Image: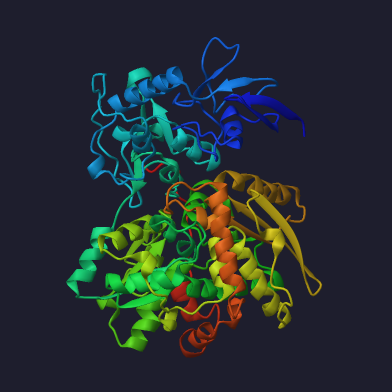
Amino acid sequence: MSMVELEINGIPVSVPAGTTILNAAKEVGVAIPKLCYHSDLDAWAACGICVVKVEGSPKMLRACATAVGPGMKVITHDPEVVEVRRTVLELILSTHPNDCLQCGRSGNCELQDLASDFGIREIPFEKRVREIAPDTSTTSIVLNPEKCVQCGRCVLVCQEMQGVHALEFIGRGDGTRLAPAADVTLDESPCIKCGQCSAHCPVGAIYEKSECRTVWNAIKAGEKHCVVQIAPAVRVAIGEAFGLEPGELATGKLYAALRRLGFDAVFDTNFSADLTILEEGTEFVKRVTEGGVLPQITSCCPAWTDYMEKYANDFIPNFSTAKSPQQMLGAMAKSYYAEQAQIDPKDMYVVSIMPCTAKKFEVSRDDNMSSTGFQDVDVALTTRELARMIKQAGIDFNSLPEEEVDSLLGEYTGAGTIFGVTGGVMEAALRSAYFLITKEDLEDVNFMDVRGLEGVKEATIDIKGTEVRVAIAHQMGNVEAVLNKVREAKEKGEEIPWHFIEVMACRGGCIGGGGQPHGATDEIRLKRTAGLYSDDEKSVQRCSHHNPMITKIYDEFLGAPLSHKAHELLHTDYMERLVYKK
């Protein structure tokens, strides 16, 4: 690797060729302010806040999009540069609403932070805020173009990272505005509700549709038995809202906080992840041994399911019919738990805490989500929403004791907890598939080849002479290449490249979900991932089929994986959907 020698503010630094000035500055402890740049995306140089001086250049250059050169001498901060940045910020603020107190990003807004850092108290330009009504057409995401700073992050995320093309800029010059593609409503657009646009937005232009008040009202009313479940990825991210390090396990504190909020029972989605593995793993083994449609494709991610039904509905026969863990737990809560607790399902209220905005869509996506005769999950909240509720309740999260889950639908194995990371569903499935095929347990349950942040991962596993080829894709933009390889093999009559495919819509899997605390980068995603793997490693049982409560539920209630009752409660079907609604 060739290295480039240069100076930044008179400090010598050596960095690999192709490094931007922005990243080279970090090597000498210099933080250049930015608004449009995000490490997940190619630099677009839209905002102009990161301008710097380079000796020999007649103009200031944008540090995010300018590569270093040999002998380059860069000045990142001087009175002139600071004044230019201040002016750029003032121009942006002149077109931005001043309703920070009513904004969900107040206190966690990149524009607000920059304005504070530069001490901006007055705007010398005429205020030119356009009145554009928010788009509240989906059950998951709200689009508020009035607050858009035209950084372009959401458009780049939607089009390049996710390959969905639901967002674009419409108009030119002062008339440019953010809008759903074709200028329809967001619900009519190709949007898959993954929420990556909101996760990357630096301000309050895109955010989750909050259901906090709905949940508060349900708890306050006291008319229903309120139960809650927490997804695997929530436990390694919620702490960030309270100053903890990304990846720090906060499971016990979460259980305690949820009880203090007023929930009657606290369950864990890790439990139903184990249940999912028994259903999905048995389905996979049946397809392999009895000649079913392969490759089998996982169905736990609702944004991926929505994408498949719109863009890849030729793969509907390949999709596992198993519901997501969220929906399985909702169904079990209003059936098995209701029966055990002698509660009428109509008197139950099930809330799920998810790292994902698409889960809000999933709870009512079709009639299968009401398998108990009632909507199985009533409300889905994001990690961000739960953090706000904990703060509203005056709970000192960091001082909470570690409490235990309600075991009936809460006990889980290590396999259940790694559902929150890319490759985790596959690894959990393989641990149990090996047992289901051989009736023996693995000596080493770690499948290292399916781990990591590489966009597409492949592995071949030998199950006592049965070769199983798997692929794992995360971040929707990586999925089409995998699907096309399968399509190509089918067209040519060749052997399919894989038997089992896992897909997660968000980068890193659920740990990087659209409802997680803002500011996720690969560094943070890796820390959250490490937290879940540590939870797996310390678990007494690490394979789903060893979960004693899962065994009990099959013995007492479901009968067996893929039984008639299991199909009624735990499985679903799919349909072709229009990319644009009519």
Q: Give 392 or 434, whichever is nearer the viewer.
A: 392
Asked if one can make out residue 370 in the rendered structure from this viewpoint, the answer is: no
Left-right relation of 547 to 170: right
Left-right relation of 368 to 277: left
Residue at the (51%, 57%) spot, across then down: 511
Residue 42 image offset from top left, x and y in percent: 56, 33
Residue at the (52%, 25%) spot, across then down: 76
Q: Residue furthest bottom?
A: 556
Which quadrant holds residue 338?
bottom left
Q: Residue furthest top?
A: 58
Q: Image height check: is 123 above or below 379?
A: above
Left-right relation of 357 to 144: right
Please identify the quadrant where the N terminus is shown. top right
Asked if one can make out residue 158 in the rendered structure from this viewpoint, the answer is: yes
Residue 416 image offset from top left, x and y in percent: 55, 71
Q: Give 181 or 427, whichever is nearer the viewer.
A: 427
Residue at the (61%, 29%) spot, across then down: 20
Please identify the quadrant where the C terminus is shown. top left
Q: Image height check: is 369 above or below 89?
A: below
Q: Give 51 or 435, whichever is nearer the viewer.
A: 51
